């Protein structure tokens, strides 16, 4: 491949090292959420084959409001009638005067290029809104200046200044509204740092930003060009050098061309960014904008309040998929269908042990499991926190082990297989899934269990036609039965210190020598009418097999379990 066609970032942009050679971002920690600003209705929307209509935009907007976002970019009103109309729609339904769409604590952002007629149109769209941020952008890097704009550095600066001054005049003409300004030097990450600083500082002054009316400087990685540490250095440079720093909200807007949008955003926040623009589940131009859901839940998983509500992630996903007409990948962090699922044996073993340990810990702490500290292997957060059930956590296929299938049988069908029986059933499951090449659902596992261990007690070669058992005053048990062995039927009787040893004795009388090596039983559900499950491991001749029985009577289940083991051993012998 002709890799020589590409240049490393250091040959494309100068990234100044901090004057004192000490970066602060590597030592920093994120201890509170930045201001998240979703740009789904603008940057996300402009990347869709079928842009959203007002209905879809409104549904998306309502979702964002309900999740708790306080600043939302709602469109590029000068670009299309749809975008213009949507901003008008919000303006007509703004809160305060009985409006229903725009709560008093939510501010909309509208996006505009540095063209006077398009700025006019943008301001026209926000008429009637009590507050808004007008977001001006222009590409600033050498390639974009030369190739796209055909303007020199100073000419670009002049265009921006004129546009910004025009915006200031239009805002002054609306004393009734709180209009703030935002500037994005598009392709910031490829722009000479001294030029970005010059332009941003110039606008801070021109717009007369102050701590109570700050300007937002939004520094995008329009197209990712380097490892995230480079972006962090670029942001730290701006953070340290921007004029009137307390009057500037430093915002970042990472894209994901190298697949490192999330890392760029996180390192940028460590480097001083206070605001992050992105899209839910990472929609956006090309490989997308940075994913705000991942960023927020990454913070959550560090014990930091993400400041947005993701407690029903599937409901959020459903709206986003509907509005974007794009689906979320099954492996998407936190939200994908498969991200809380383990198919592989050792992961399943660890997770099911982790769940058991979590339950014990919660009990020791005297707290509900949903409140207890989380430390379950392989699950970075409790899926229940984002509205997921535990159903999908363990799924079984040919790569699964005994832990996984035991977990599913216990949690979904109430069968708690004895430890020593689990490897035996695991082999059965593995054979079945290897043959089918498919996943085995909990229901299929249960049916396989019944067919393997329970059915031989009911329709095997050795059948119990009838039986009774009683206990003599001396404590000995007697087992009386009619046994059918192949074609032959006969009455037999046995005694023992319990009903099962008496049954074994009756079998011996019929010529079938049985040693009961292991035995376990438990109730399947709760309450008087629940079934019992019994498990028995028996040796017949030199063959050892497990059998199981399920019945409302514990005794019947036990007898069936022994009979099933006998028949399985007989079939094998
Ligand atoms: C990184 C980003 O996400 S930037 C946002 C991109 N989003 C969009 O483009 C979505 C909406 N855009 C549109 O609907 C259209 O592009 C419109 C309506 C805004 C403008 O359409 P047109 O007038 O046909 O212009 P078109 O988009 O083809 O061309 C861009 C022109 O604007 C110039 N330009 C590009 N960006 C800017 C800017 N931020 N400010 C001023 N001029 C700009 C280009 O140099 C080019 O100028 P030229 O005609 O002299 O060569
Ligand atoms: C202009 C900005 C904010 C943008 O969308 C980008 O650079 O990707």
Image (cartoon, rainbow, N blue to C red):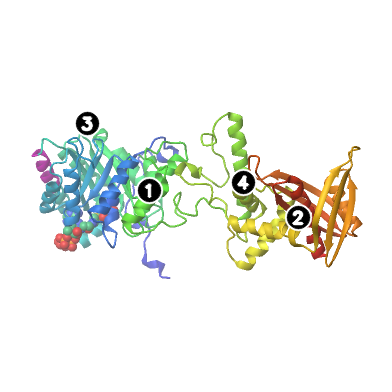
Discs 1/3, front: 1
Q: Which residue is mark 4?
A: 352
Q: Which residue is mark 3?
A: 212
Q: Secondary structure at mark 4?
A: helix
| C-beta proximity under 8 Å, tags 1 and 4 | no
> What range of the chain is rendered magenta?
162-173
Upstream in sequence: badge 2 or badge 4: 4
Alpha-carbon span between mark 1 and mark 3 = 34 Å
Alpha-carbon span between mark 1 and mark 2 = 47 Å
Upstream in sequence: badge 2 or badge 3: 3
Residue at position x 77%, y 57% from top? 564
Secondary structure mostly seen in the magenta stretch: helix
Q: Which residue is mark 1?
A: 316
| C-beta proximity under 8 Å, tags 4 and 3 | no
Q: Tell me: 262 left or right of 172.
A: right
Upstream in sequence: badge 4 or badge 3: 3
Upstream in sequence: badge 1 or badge 2: 1
Query: Dot 1 surroundings within 10 Å: few (below 14), some, or many (20 or more)?
Result: many
Q: Is residue 16 above or below residue 482?
A: above
Indicate the position of residue 488 as horizontal and vertical percent values. 86, 65
Alpha-carbon span between mark 2 and mark 4 = 25 Å
Q: Tell me: 522 left or right of 478.
A: left
Residue 461 in view: yes
| C-beta proximity under 8 Å, tags 2 and 4 | no
Alpha-carbon span between mark 4 and mark 3 = 53 Å
Q: Secondary structure at mark 3?
A: loop
Query: Dot 3 surroundings within 10 Å: few (below 14), some, or many (20 or more)?
Result: few
Residue at position x 21%, y 41% from top? 201
Alpha-carbon span between mark 2 and mark 3 = 76 Å
- Quarter placement of the C terminus: bottom right
Indicate the position of residue 41 as horizontal and vertical percent values. 27, 51
Q: Which residue is mark 2?
A: 547
């Amino acid at each position: 491949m002709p890799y020589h066609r590409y240049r490393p970032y250091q040959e494309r942009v100068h990234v100044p090292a901090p004057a004192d050679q000490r970066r602060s971002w590597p030592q920093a920690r994120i201890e509170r959420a930045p201001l998240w600003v979703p740009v789904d209705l603008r940057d996300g929307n402009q990347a869709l084959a079928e842009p959203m209509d007002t209905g879809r935009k409104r549904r998306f907007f309502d979702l964002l409001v309900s999740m708790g976002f306080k600043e939302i970019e709602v469109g590029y009103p000068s670009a299309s009638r749809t975008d213009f109309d949507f901003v008008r729609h919000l303006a007509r339904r703004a809160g305060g005067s009985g409006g229903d769409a725009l709560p008093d604590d939510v501010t909309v952002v509208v996006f505009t290029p540095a063209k006077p007629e398009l700025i006019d149109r943008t301001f026209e769209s926000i008429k009637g809104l009590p507050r808004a941020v007008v977001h001006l952008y222009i590409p600033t890097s050498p390639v974009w200046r030369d190739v796209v704009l055909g303007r020199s550095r100073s000419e670009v600066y002049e265009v921006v200044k004129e546009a910004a001054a025009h915006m200031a005049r239009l805002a002054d003409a609306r004393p009734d509204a709180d209009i703030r300004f935002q500037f994005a030097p598009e392709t910031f990450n490829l722009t000479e740092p001294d030029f970005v600083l010059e332009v941003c500082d110039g606008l801070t002054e021109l717009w007369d930003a102050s701590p109570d009316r700050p300007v937002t400087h939004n520094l995008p990685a329009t197209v990712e060009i380097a490892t995230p540490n480079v972006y962090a250095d670029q942001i730290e440079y701006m953070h340290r050098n921007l004029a009137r720093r307390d009057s500037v909200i430093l915002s970042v807007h990472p894209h994901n061309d190298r697949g490192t949008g999330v890392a760029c955003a996180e390192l940028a926040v460590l480097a001083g960014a206070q605001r992050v623009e992105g899209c839910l589940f990472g929609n956006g131009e090309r490989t997308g904008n940075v994913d705000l859901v991942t960023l927020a839940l990454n913070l959550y998983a560090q014990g930091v309040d993400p400041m947005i509500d993701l407690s029903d992630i599937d409901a959020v996903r459903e709206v986003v998929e509907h509005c974007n007409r794009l689906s979320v990948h099954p492996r998407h962090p936190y939200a994908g269908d498969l991200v809380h699922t383990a198919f592989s044996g050792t992961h399943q073993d660890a997770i099911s042990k982790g769940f058991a340990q979590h339950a014990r810990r919660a009990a020791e702490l005297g707290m509900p499991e949903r409140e207890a500290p989380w430390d379950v292997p392989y699950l970075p957060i409790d899926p229940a926190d984002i509205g997921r059930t535990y159903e999908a956590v363990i799924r079984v296929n040919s790569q699964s082990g005994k832990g996984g299938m035991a977990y599913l049988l216990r949690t979904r069908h109430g069968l708690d297989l004895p430890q020593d029986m689990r490897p035996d059933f695991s082999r059965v499951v593995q054979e079945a899934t290897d043959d089918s090449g498919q996943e085995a659902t909990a229901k299929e596992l249960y049916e396989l269990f019944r067919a393997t261990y329970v059915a031989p007690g009911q329709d095997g070669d050795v059948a119990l036609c009838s039986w009774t058992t009683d206990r003599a005053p001396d404590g000995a048990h007697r087992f009386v039965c009619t046994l059918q062995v192949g074609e032959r039927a006969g009455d037999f009787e046995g005694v023992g210190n319990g009903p099962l040893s008496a049954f074994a004795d009756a079998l011996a009388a019929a010529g079938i020598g049985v040693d009961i090596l292991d035995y376990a039983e438990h109730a399947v559900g709760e309450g008087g009418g629940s079934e019992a499950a019994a498990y028995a491991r028996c040796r017949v001749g030199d063959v050892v097999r497990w059998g199981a029985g399920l019945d409302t009577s514990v005794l019947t289940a036990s007898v069936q379990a022994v009979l099933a083991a006998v028949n399985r051993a007989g079939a094998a012998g």
